[in-house]
Amino acid sequence: MTAAPYSLGIRENRTAFLEQLLQVFFVGLTIGMQRTVLPALAESEFGLARGSMTALFALVVSFGIVKGSMNFVSGRLSERVGRRRVLLWGWLVAVPIPFLIYWAPSWGWLVAANVLLGVNQGFTWSMTVTAKMDIVRANQRGLATGLNEFLGYGGVALAGLLTGYLASLYDPRLSLLVFGIVVIAAALLAGQFAFTETLAFAQAEAAAFNAAQLPDGNSASSQRARYVAGPDKPTTAEIFALVTWRNKTFMALAQAGCIEKFVDALVWALVPVFLIAKGASLIEIGWVTGLYGFIWGISQLWTGPLSDRVGRKAPSVAGFFICAAGVVAFPFFTTVWAWGLTAAVIGVGMALLYPTLIAAMGDIAHPAWRGSALGVYRFWRDLGYAIGALAMGLIADATGLLEAGFWLTGAAMLISGLWLVLAMEETHGES
């Protein structure tokens, strides 16, 4: 095996990198098509009982449990069968989703559709992240994850805004059916004909590391101190334990990933219901939630590279504290422009922490088992959807206050940020 075909770097692998960006944009569009319309029309269109927040949040709970599990499964699978095959499996699972939404006679059908969405997202989004970690240099991981999440959450925001307009102008179910079919078909075609397999890059990096010379020309000794010690070929149980509790920095990153998803669950399910209760229209809700997604997405163009320069810890911690402040402040405002401004602030906080946590995982996970380590991290991260949504639904039903979900999320983000301050070691250094 020669080193040249597996040289690391964005420029050296720009075609594969652009293919991955296209895929994550499709992934974002797929999840985003549900975020404005379904929660806002849960009662009028899909028969959900008024005021049943726990039932409403079942949509997010089912998604979080399945996506978290599939992140872990896809990470392990991708080290056996390759990244591209797992990606294609994820898109095939997504095919029934728009039809389930269109024909849904009850809310339970939408929960079932979100189970399939969880499988889709766990397989497809995971592979765009893992494939990027395969082909970039250590000092490009922040930039790579920033670009990845920019395109992904830009797609989420754009789909939420577009489907809000379409549902206001046309039949909501038909709008989601047509939008979903077009996006999923395009993604399948792109995955089949325009997605480069990158597993060989990770294998070459691991082999070169063991030979004391990395594919990007750096000495392996400069990386060795940062990689967490572990077996060369860890079992599923070993890699799960290592990331979850045996290493304190991995553990800090895993809990941070879990808690930050409380914010996204809040914006997905609680914010549209809260705004409807305050008299906002579907289009206004689309703008508020879309602004959150757009700012989150576009800000990662600078927050990802920032972490390559200043390290991973400071931006992550700052992001948690900014999100906590924005979430707590949100329900105290009463106008669309104020909600939009607060949503933008929350988006900046998410942009600071989101790609940075992924890059930190990539910094210290050995290339031989990096895909699995990212899978465990993403398991805990997306399980946060389920934990946060269930907690918010229960507290809202118990208190009768939608605002209680905001306060719970703000407190959780503050505590999680403090955990990072105390337990996370800086993972990024000169490369």
Image: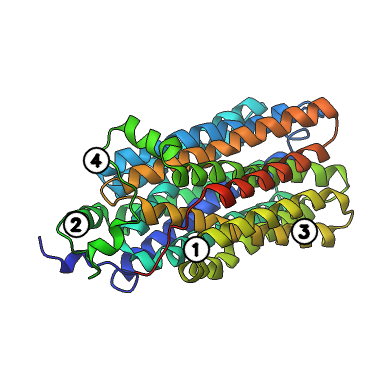
Q: Is residue 185 left or right of residue 225?
A: right
- Which mark identifies residue 146? 1
Cβ atoms under marks 1 and 3 closer than 8 Å: no
Q: Residues within 10 Å of mark 2 (few under 14, many from 20)?
A: many
Spatial distance from mark 1 to mark 3, Cα to Cα?
22 Å
Residue at 88 percent across and 47 percent down: it is 279
Q: Secondary structure at mark 3?
A: helix
> Which residue is tagged 4?
80
Residue nearest the observer in this picture, 23 or 141: 141
> x, y percentage for residue 270?
74, 41
> Is residue 46 in view?
no
Q: Amino acid at mark 4?
A: Arg
Spatial distance from mark 2 to mark 1, Cα to Cα?
25 Å
Q: Residues within 10 Å of mark 3 (few under 14, many from 20)?
A: many
Q: How many marks?
A: 4
**As drawn, which residue projects farthest toward the left?**
1
Spatial distance from mark 4 to mark 2, Cα to Cα?
15 Å
Q: Is residue 158 left or right of residue 327?
A: left
The nearer-to-camera label among 4 and 2 is: 2
Cβ atoms under marks 1 and 4 closer than 8 Å: no
Q: Amino acid at mark 3?
A: Thr
- Which mark identifies residue 342? 3
Residue at 77 percent across and 50 percent down: it is 282
Q: Secondary structure at mark 4?
A: helix
> Which residue is tagged 2?
204
> x, y percentage for residue 372?
34, 42
> Is residue 13 in view?
yes
> x, y percentage for residue 430?
38, 69
Q: Amino acid at mark 1?
A: Gly
